[in-house]
């Protein structure tokens, strides 16, 4: 996904609002997941998020989303966010987010997700790392619920 940062998206310093970036991350992640599952989805979790560099009014914000691993009714997606200066083309990674979506039907029941084609060693590694993050997330959820 690519968008130009307009003044309406920015704080008084001329940097895009963190909340706007979070919204775009949610949308980009959801689109990638929808294209895999072709189901309704809800966001179950967004892992911790950092803003490494400001993205200025007039820059492009570029979001690249990739499904990393699917589980039974949930899947993880990675969203990398870049800024790109329109006049120079200079591109910088500004955030990386991992989100979990859960597939649901219209009555709220959970839906099984089709398998993800994992072919290369790199894709297998990405999926194993996602499985480790999933365990940590579910542990944290239990701790939060008490
Ligand atoms: C996310 C939600 C659907 C989970 O429902 P639930 O009945 O508590 O979940 P379950 O324990 O049955 O787990 C269902 C799946 O979600 C996953 N899941 C549940 N909570 C999770 C969390 N906090 N983080 C990551 N994954 C989670 C489980 O691992 C499971 O996946 P799996 O089938 O692949 O193993 C439910 O908590 C919910 O509706 N939350 C609100 C979602 C929302 O409003 N999002 C914002 C707007 S879209």
Image (cartoon, helix red, strand yellow):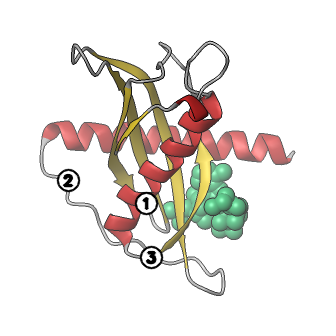
Does any atom of ligand 1 lie closer than 8 Å to the CB of label 1? yes
What is the distance, in whole Å, between disc 1 and disc 2 at their CAs?
13 Å
Q: Residues within 10 Å of mark 1 (few under 14, many from 20)?
A: some
Residue at 52% across, 58% down: 101
Question: Where is residue 122 shown, x and y percent of the image?
Answer: 18, 36
Which residue is the site of mark 3?
39
Q: Where 88 sits versus 22, above or below?
A: above
Q: Residue furthest left?
A: 120
Residue at 37% across, 70% down: 37
Q: Which mark is residue 71?
A: 1
Dot 1 or dot 2, earlier in sequence = 1
Element under label 2? loop
Residue 92: quarter of image: top left
Which residue is the site of mark 2?
118
What is the distance, in whole Å, between disc 1 and disc 3 at their CAs?
15 Å
Q: Name the side, left or right, on which 118 lies relative to 138.
A: left
| Ligand 1 positioned in quadrant | bottom right
Q: Residues within 10 Å of mark 2 (few under 14, many from 20)?
A: some
Dot 2 or dot 3, earlier in sequence = 3
């Amino acid at each position: 996904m690519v968008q130009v940062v307009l003044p309406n998206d920015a704080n008084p310093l001329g940097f895009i609002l963190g909340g706007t970036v979070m919204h775009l991350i949610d949308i980009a992640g959801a689109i990638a997941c929808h294209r895999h599952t072709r189901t309704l989805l809800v966001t179950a979790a967004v892992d911790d998020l950092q803003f490494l560099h400001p993205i200025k009014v007039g820059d492009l914000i570029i979001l690249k989303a990739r499904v990393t691993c699917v589980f039974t009714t949930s899947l993880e997606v990675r969203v990398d966010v870049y800024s790109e200066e329109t006049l120079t083309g200079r591109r910088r990674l500004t955030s990386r987010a991992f989100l979990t979506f859960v597939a649901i039907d219209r009555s709220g029941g959970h839906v099984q997700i089709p398998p993800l084609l994992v072919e290369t060693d790199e894709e297998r590694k990405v999926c194993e790392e996602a499985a480790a993050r999933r365990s940590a997330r579910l542990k944290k959820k239990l701790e939060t619920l008490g």
